[in-house]
Image (cartoon, rainbow, N blue to C red):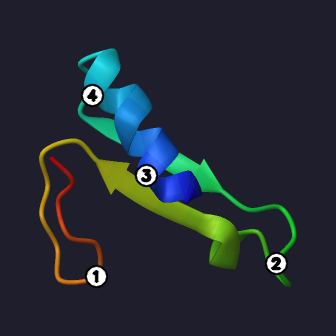
Amino acid sequence: MHGKQVLTYLRLMNLPPGLLMNFGGATFREGIKRVANGHRSAEAPAIH
């Protein structure tokens, strides 16, 4: 759900990269996810 929200903000502001940060993980590194506008990956299908 939060990944889709970040992607929506990126599209509305016409920005290519973004970071989704989760501060509740065991380490900070585990909680960072890069989200790219217009990028299609096997994990997260593109939303139209």
**The disc labelled 2 sits on which kind of residue?**
Gly
Please tell me whether mark 2 or mark 4 is closer to you in this view. Answer: 4
Which residue matches tag 2?
25
Of tags 2 and 1, which is closer to the observer? 1
Where disc 4 sits, the SS reads helix
Judge whether 29 appears above or below 35 on screen: below
Camera-nearest residue between 8 and 38: 8
Tag 4: amino acid = Arg
The front one of 6 and 20 is 6
Query: How many labels, in total?
Result: 4
To which quarter of the image does residue 37 belong? top left
Q: In the rendered image, which residue does mark 3 sit on?
A: 4
Report x, y in % for residue 10. Answer: 35, 30
* Label 2 crowd (10 A; few <14 / some 14-19 / many >=20): few
- The secondary element bearing badge 3 is classed as helix
Q: Residue at x 28, y 82 (%)?
A: 43
**Quarter of the image containing the N terminus?**
bottom right
According to the picture, the residue beneath numbered tag 1 turns out to be 43
Q: Residues within 10 Å of mark 1 (few under 14, many from 20)?
A: few
Q: Which residue is mark 4?
A: 11
Q: Residues within 10 Å of mark 3 (few under 14, many from 20)?
A: few
Drawn side of residue 31 relative to residue 5, left or right: right
At which x and y percent is residue 14?
Answer: 23, 18
Question: Would you say the residues marked 3 and 1 are in contact, meaning their CB atoms lie under 8 Å apart?
Answer: no
Whichever of labels 3 and 1 marks the residue nearer the N terminus, that label is 3
Give above or below for 18 relative to 30.
above
- Say whether marks 4 and 1 touch (CB < 8 Å): no
**Gap in Å between the C-alphas at discs 3 and 1?**
13 Å
Residue visible at 42% across and 57% down?
34
